[in-house]
Amino acid sequence: MKRIMIAVLSAAIAFVGMLTTGCRDNAVTFDVAAMKQIIKEKTNRFTQAHIIGDTTFLNNIVTQDAKAYPPNSDAVIGRAAIAALNSHWVSFDIKEFHEETMDFYGNKDYLIDEGTYYLRYGKDNTIDKGKYINVWKHVGGDWKIYSNMWNTSMPAVPAK
């Protein structure tokens, strides 16, 4: 009787192990590399929207409760406040804007894109280079910017 119980117990453990392995193999895994390509495409649209002045796109690429942390300024919180910031930024006559990802990681809820940017704007073709961090949030089946921080790497201009 003891041998039968051990055999039944061993079979049950083997069966549970087989089920667990099978479930693990069939589980959907999160593909960060595929998400990086999606975010790269959204980032390209984001930078182009600045150049062409597409504030509708810029205002809708962020979550309702998004936060922007522009340089030399207080935090800008919420889509309405960020819309005002977007209108201000596109008025600078942006001629060129690129972001290059240096590090990318995350999960099914949030993706982090860290990198550098290059910006050329205004009648004097002012150049700005710096770094950024964008936090993307999965909302309603789409990825939107939840938090955006950037700052220049250019030397400070002395006060006159």
Image: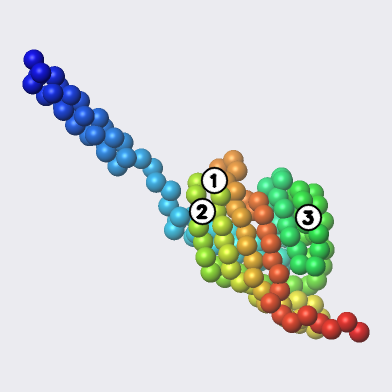
Asked whether disc 3 touches disc 1, contact meaning CB atoms under 8 Å apart, the reply is: no
Q: Is residue 93 visible?
A: yes
Query: As shown in the figure, which amino acid type bears the numbered disc 2?
Result: Gly
- Mark 3, Cα crowd under 10 Å, few <14 / some 14-19 / many 20+, is some
Q: Quadrant of the C terminus?
A: bottom right
- Mark 1, Cα crowd under 10 Å, few <14 / some 14-19 / many 20+, is few
Disc marking residue 109: 1
Query: As shown in the figure, which amino acid type bears the numbered disc 3?
Result: Val
Residue projecting furthest to the front: 2
104 up-or-down from 4: above or below: below
Q: Is residue 49 left or right of residue 30?
A: right
Q: Is residue 96 visible?
A: no
> What is the secondary structure assignment of the residue under circle 3?
strand
Label 2: which residue?
Answer: 106
- Mark 2, Cα crowd under 10 Å, few <14 / some 14-19 / many 20+, is some
Q: Is residue 45 left or right of residue 88?
A: left
Disc on the earlier residue, 3 or 2: 3
> What is the secondary structure assignment of the residue under circle 1?
loop
Label 3: which residue?
Answer: 76
Name which residue lies at 69% across and 77% down.
Answer: 153
Disc marking residue 117: none
Q: Who is closer to the viewer here, 7 or 45?
A: 7
Image quadrant assignment for residue 114: bottom right
x and y percentages locating residue 2 in the rendered image: 10, 18
Query: As shown in the figure, which amino acid type bears the numbered disc 1?
Result: Asp
Disc on the earlier residue, 3 or 1: 3
Asked whether disc 3 touches disc 2, contact meaning CB atoms under 8 Å apart, the reply is: no
